[in-house]
Amino acid sequence: KTKAGTVTITATAADGSGVSASATITVTTSRKKCDGRAEYKGVQTEQHEGGTYYDVQQCQRCKYEFTCNSANCDHVDHRASAGCPNDLGKHNYYTTYTMTCTIP
């Protein structure tokens, strides 16, 4: 599991020469608000009696599950610009990781 922190890795030659080298790796994290423009995966889609549509999409970036039951939506894009009154917009926070490696 990826977490913030620093680790130093040292390698020593196996030939008995005593030659070694090390590198320091630093991982930093940042929490960002998901912008709703990530890829979505359909989790559940049903057509109920009376024409009520029930659609669940899951954001593949932050795993937020969005439910749309609007009969006016084509259940493809879920954006106000596409006619969905339930515009996905910004939702869950997700964590990004940055890794830097320092070799002396």
Image: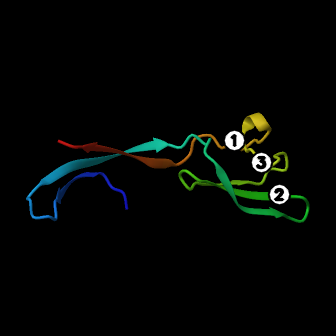
Residue 60: % across, % down: 59, 53
Q: Nearer the viewer, mark 3 or mark 2?
A: 3
Which amino acid type is marked by label 2?
Tyr
Residue 34: % across, % down: 53, 43
Residue lying at 57% horizontally and 40% vertically, measured from the top left: 35
Residue lying at 85% horizontally and 58% vertically, measured from the top left: 52
Of residues 43 and 92, the one drawn nearer to the viewer in this rendering: 43
Mark 3 and 2 residues: CB-CB less than 8 Å, in contact?
A: no
According to the picture, the residue beneath numbered tag 1 turns out to be 87
Residue lying at 81% horizontally and 64% vertically, measured from the top left: 46
Which amino acid type is marked by label 3?
Val
Of residues 3 and 24, the one drawn nearer to the viewer in this rendering: 24
According to the picture, the residue beneath numbered tag 3 turns out to be 76
Of residues 96 and 46, the one drawn nearer to the viewer in this rendering: 96
For label 2, the crowd category at 10 Å Cα-Cα, with few meaning under 14, some 14 to 19 and many 20 or more, is some
Q: Left or right of 1: which side holds 54?
A: right
Which quadrant of the figure has residue 103? top left
Quadrant where the C terminus sits is: top left
Residue 77: % across, % down: 74, 44
Q: Secondary structure at mark 2?
A: strand
Counting the numbered discs, the total is 3
Residue lying at 48% horizontally and 47% vertically, measured from the top left: 93
Q: Nearer the viewer, mark 3 or mark 1?
A: 3
Q: CA distance from mark 2 to mark 1?
A: 16 Å
According to the picture, the residue beneath numbered tag 2 turns out to be 53
Which amino acid type is marked by label 1?
Asp
